[in-house]
Each structure stands twice: as structure tokens, then as C-alpha cells.
Image (cartoon, rainbow, N blue to C red):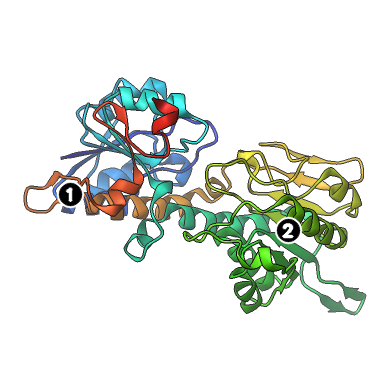
Amino acid sequence: MRVAVPAEIEANETRVAATPETVKKFIALGATVAIQSGAGTTSGIPDADYTAAGATVLPTAAETLADADIVLKVRRPGPGELGNLKRGAAVIAIMDPYGHEAELTGIAGAGVSAFAMEFMPRITRAQVMDVLSSQANLAGYRAVIDGAGEYGRALPMMMTAAGTVPAARIFIMGVGVAGLQAIATARRLGAIVTATDVRPATKEQVESLGAKFVAVEDDEFKQAETSGGYAKEMSAEYKAKQAALVASHIAKQDIVITTALIPGRPAPKLISADMVHSMRAGSVIIDLAVERGGNCELARPGETFVTENGVKIVGHLNVPGRLAATASALYAKNLYAFVETMIDKETKTLAPKWDDDLVKATLLTRDGAVVHPNFLTKAD
């Protein structure tokens, strides 16, 4: 059983899919591990550390992927990598298939079993495999650090002989894993924190972290959560009421961090151009949803810019990758925990249980076809 970890090919991807720690664990399961030279460099892992852990470090992606039974990646394989994959291999990554159906069809054509880690069901046994949570947690933390850096002023209230420095006001929009970590981090740094979300269950979570909850709490709000714990798409009427409340609140904020995403859909627009123009000069917006179109109407993917009225809008791509070493360590553990469930411990071979809930939820392609129900009609 051969496990392969090629270097990531996207320019802004700094993470890696295996660490020396997980290499040792795969070897303990009976696997041989091949790592492409330089794969861990941007995560602070030199080739020598992989070699010391027992992996074979190879110079090219083709040599690394040759005859691999399991391929671990951060991002889905690109067209240039597909020709190096063995038919029947398990390819496990963050696949980002929505809106990329053509690429998904290409992966199916390579004859591999492709698994999307971001589709892992949120059930107890899969918590250790939940890449959305592990990476979003870091994104929420980094968003506050980035916001503090761009703001250019102190966050906590300080009473000095020269005068009192007021505490910064930070508003978190979207209280999932990223939002909760952003709240906790902002509070630890001494800011006055408020937060909003359409899901009623988040109110108690926000308040438990010492922040104030801001939302229109009507009947629609009380039912605004799916059985899977995600936010529902709200009605136009509710959006208008919430926007009016947010507009008055946002004008008083120093830093706004947006984290709202709905799986499979463009990011909801939460901050209009008018709201941006109502903010004070020197205030900052950090848009964590910019890769899906952004929560802020004026956000630009991969750019940081200042508006005419002096508001700085930050649209960093791959925010977890801005903490590459930590993000890689957590992601690699997520991958190992999932792969371990698909390995026969006696024969030391890859043996997925195709009726397992984890496999059914994450499997995108198999035997040359797209098999995930969310994409059957789109890909056929």
C-alpha cells in the first residue's frame, strides 16, 4: 500500500497534506509513503524531516504519484496531475466541486475514487476528520490578527498617564466555527465584540463568549437553521430588516469580520457599498468569504485596498494557509483519521467500505463516473 503526497500546484497554497507525524502513523499501518521534494517547505517542513520519519522523498510529482494507492492533497488534482494517477487509486483532498463540474468530470475520467474532505458529515465519529472546522477555526483567529494589524490602533482599552485609549469595536458577521474563534480571539485581545447570525442557536454561543448578539429575532429567525446545523437562505423581507439593523450598527464599528457561507452557493452579500461608505476612516473589513464572491459588495479576491472614505477592505485568499504550519498539522491529522477507517488492518491494504456513512458522504467519483448525488444531474 503506497501513500503519495505531491507538492501543491496552486500558487497561493502553502499547506501540505502530510506531516512527519502522520507519515509515521501511515508507516505503522503498513504503508510506504512518498513525498515530493519541497512539498512541505512553505509549511516549515524540510525534506529531511520527512526522510527522518521514514518517507521516501522524490524529485517530481510523476515519480511521487507512480503506482500510488492513496493520494493525499490539499486541493483537488489539476489536469496536469491526472495522467500520473493510477486507476482505482483513492484521491483525498478539499475538492471544491461546486461550480467546477467540468473539473469533476475530468477527475472521474481518470478512473480514481475521489473523496471531498469538506463533505465529511458532522457526526460524532467524524469530528476528528472535520476539515471545515479545523481550517475555519484558524481562519477566524487569523482574521482578527489581520484586522488588528491593518487597523493601526490598539484593541484593548488602556488607561495611561497621557490619556485613555478607547477599546476597539469589532463586529463578527456569521457565527460558525470561524466566527466563534474570531469572537474569542477579539475578546482575549480586549476589544468590545458584537456578532450576528441568522441561526437562533448561535445567540447563546455568542453571549457565552462575552459578546453581544445583534439580530432581528422574529419567527423566521427562530426557524433559520437546517438539520445539519447550517444557515438557511432567508427571505427577502427578513434580509431587508436585518440589513437595516446591521447598517445602523456597522457605522459605529472599527473592525468588521465576515464569515458567512452557505454550502454550494455564492456567499450572501451582507455589507453593501452604502454600509461601507457609512463607516469611519481607518476602519477595517476582513472578508473571509471572498473566495465565494464575498460577503462585502466591494471586496476583491486577493486584494487589500482603501475606499474613497478611508475604509480598508481585506480580501485575503486561503486564510488558513496564512498559518501554514498549524493548518497543515491539523489538516494532515484530519486526513489520517479518515484514511485509517478505509484500511484493512490485517491485510494492510486499502479497503473502503462503500456503504459506510463517511464514504458515502464524501465520495465524488468512482469507476470512471461521478457518483455523488449532488452532482449526478449536473455531470450527466
Q: Residue at x 61, y 55 (%)?
A: 142
- Check residue 212 in the rendering and tell me which mark sits there, or answer none: none
Residue 294 image point, x, y percent: 68, 43
Q: Residue at x 41, y 27 (%)?
A: 379
Q: Which residue is mark 1?
A: 343
The crowding category of the residue bearing disc 1, from other C-alpha atoms within 10 Å (few below 14, some 14 to 19, many at least 20), is some
Lateral position of residue 380 relative to residue 197, left or right: left
Whether residue 124 is situated above or below residue 290 in the rendered picture: below
| Amino acid at circle 1 | Ile
Q: Tell me, yes or no, whether the two marked residues, 2 and 1, touch with CB atoms within 8 Å.
A: no
The front one of 58 and 198 is 198
Q: Residue at x 66, y 38 (%)?
A: 293
| Amino acid at circle 2 | Ala
Q: Which quarter of the rendered picture does the C terminus lie within? A: top left
Lateral position of residue 29 relative to residue 158, left or right: left
Lateral position of residue 29 relative to residue 58, left or right: left
Q: Is residue 287 visible?
A: yes
Q: CA distance from mark 2 to mark 1?
A: 45 Å
Residue 257 image point, x, y percent: 70, 56
- Check residue 148 in the rendering and tell me which mark sits there, or answer none: 2
Q: Residue at x 46, y 43 (%)?
A: 15
Q: Please identify the quarter of the rendering in which residue 130 is found.
A: bottom left
Residue 28 image point, x, y percent: 17, 53
Q: Check disc 2 and report its element: helix, strand or loop.
A: helix
Whether residue 108 is situated above or below residue 180 in the rendered picture: above
